[in-house]
Image: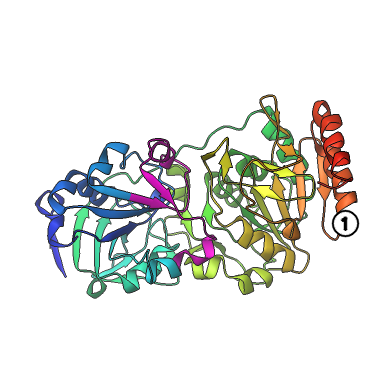
Amino acid sequence: MGATAVEELELARYVRPGDTVAWGQACAEPTSLTQLLMRQRADIGRFRCFLGIPVSDTVRPEHADHVSFVSYTASGSNRALYDAGTLDIVPCHYSVLPRLLCAGPLRADVALLQLAPTGRPGIYSLGAGDDYLSAAIDTARVVLAEVNEQAPCTAGSREVHEDELDLVVHTSREPAYAEPSSPGETARRVAHEVASIVPDGATLQCGVGALPDAVLAELGDRTDLGIHTGLLSDAAADLMAAGVVTNARKSLDRGRTVAGMLMGSRRVAEFADTNPAITLRETGYTHDPGVLAALDGLVAINTALEVDLTGQTNAEEVGGSYVGAVGGAVDFLRGAARARGGLPVVALPATAGERSRIVARLGGPVTTPRCDAGVVVTEYGVADLRGVPLAERVERMLAIAHPDHRQALAEAAESSGGRS
C-alpha cells in the first residue's frame, strides 16, 4: 500500500483495459478518484464502470467514448446516460448486488473507496456507505481509496485497514451531497394517508425520493419508531434528532438506526458523523430476508410508477424509457410481509398529469408481482390487498384511483371478466 497525492496518480497503472470499476454511490462516491478516472479514461483504454445512484455529475454521456456504463438503475444523473444510449441496465434485486460484483460477468476488478479517518493510524471508516461496496472490497484485484477528512466517520460492521488497500490519496473536500426535493401538495396528501397506518414503535424502511421523505415528515407525533433501511436521508435524521426515532422497540439492533448508505445533504452527513446511534451495514445484512423477517413491526414504504388493478407494480419504465429500478423494493416488501406485524406499502399519487397511475394493464415490466402485493396507498385512500382475491382487489383499487379515471378502469376490468 502506498500513499500519494491525487494529481500525481496515474490510474492506468491500476486499471486495465477490459476491467470493471465500481465505487460507492450517493454520498459515498470518492469524487477525487472518479473525476480523475474520467479525465484519464483515454490513457487506460476501454473499460467498464458499474454505477449506483449518483448524486454528482461526475459521469457524463461524452465519457462513453472510452467507458462502458452499467447500472441497476436509471435514477439520478444515470438518466442522462440512459437517454443518450450510453447506459445498460441489469434488472436485479438489490439483495443480489454483492454477489454480482464478486463473481460472474459483473465482477468488479477495481474498487474505488471514499473513507473517513478514525483518528487511529491505518484504520479507516467506510464513511458514507458500506452497502454493496463491502463485497467488492474483499474480491476486487485492486482497491484504491480516497481518505477524505470531510467524510463522515460512521460505525459499521467493518473498518478498512491500510493493508487492504493498494493505494491511498488524502483529500479534504466536501463529499457529494444531494439536496432533498420538496414534495408537492399531492405527495403530501399521499404521505398523510400512509402515515395514518404507521403505528408507534414501528421499524421503518423508506425508499428513494420526495414521497418517502414526505411520509417521514408526517410522523412527528409518533413514539419510539425504529429505522432499518437501505438509505438514510435528511428526513430520517430529522426524526432521530427530534426523538421520534429511538429504536427502543426494535427486535434487532435495539437502540440503533441501521442503513446501507447516506443519501442527502450535508445535514444527514453531519448528523451521522461519529453518531453511535447510527450503524451503516452491508447489503448482505440490510436486505437479508431473514433479518427483515425478524424485524417485528417492519413497515416498508416504497413507491412505483404504476400499479394495476390486481396489485402488480411497475417501478422501472415509463413510455418505453427506463427511469427507475427493481432495487430493494421487492426485498423489503417481502421482508415486511413475513415480519410479525409487518406492513408492506407501495405509495404513489393516483395520477401523473392527466394519466392514471392506477391502470388496468401495466405499461412496463412487472417489478413486483401480484402475489407479493401488500398495501397500496394513494391520496384517495388505502387498499389492503393482502389475502384478497382478484375480483375484490379490483374493487379496492378502483376506490383509490382518481375519480376521473374510475369508470374507464371499471369498464376495462369488466371487459376482462371482472379481473385485470
Q: State the image quarter where residue 295 is shown.
A: bottom right
Which residue is the site of mark 1?
389
Q: Residues within 10 Å of mark 1 (few under 14, many from 20)?
A: few
Q: Is residue 366 above or below residue 182?
A: below
Q: Is residue 346 above or below residue 246?
A: above
State which quarter of the image contains the N terminus: bottom left
**Residue 295 magenta-drawn?**
no
Q: Secondary structure at mark 1?
A: loop
**Residue 287: x, y in percent?**
56, 65
Q: Residue at x 85, y 49 (%)?
A: 393
Q: Residue at x 24, y 60 (%)?
A: 18
Q: State the image quarter where residue 55 is shown.
A: top left
Is residue 324 among the parts visible in the rendering?
Answer: yes
Q: Residue at x 85, y 45 (%)?
A: 394
Q: From the viewer's perspective, tell me whether residue 301 is left or right of residue 145.
A: right
**Which residue type carries mark 1?**
Pro
Q: Residue at x 70, y 49 (%)?
A: 346
Q: State the image quarter where residue 343 is shown.
A: bottom right
**Residue 309: x, y in percent?**
79, 45
Magenta residues, start to end:
69-98
Is residue 281 among the parts visible in the rendering?
Answer: no
Task: Say which of 73 and 365 sits in front.
Answer: 365
Q: From the viewer's perspective, tell me whether residue 305 is left or right of residue 382.
A: left
Task: Say which of 132 and 4 sits in front.
Answer: 132
**Residue 206: x, y in percent?**
61, 51
Q: Is residue 192 above or below residue 268?
A: above
**Residue 322: x, y in percent?**
51, 42
Task: Say which of 85 and 36 sits in front.
Answer: 85
**Residue 71 magenta-drawn?**
yes
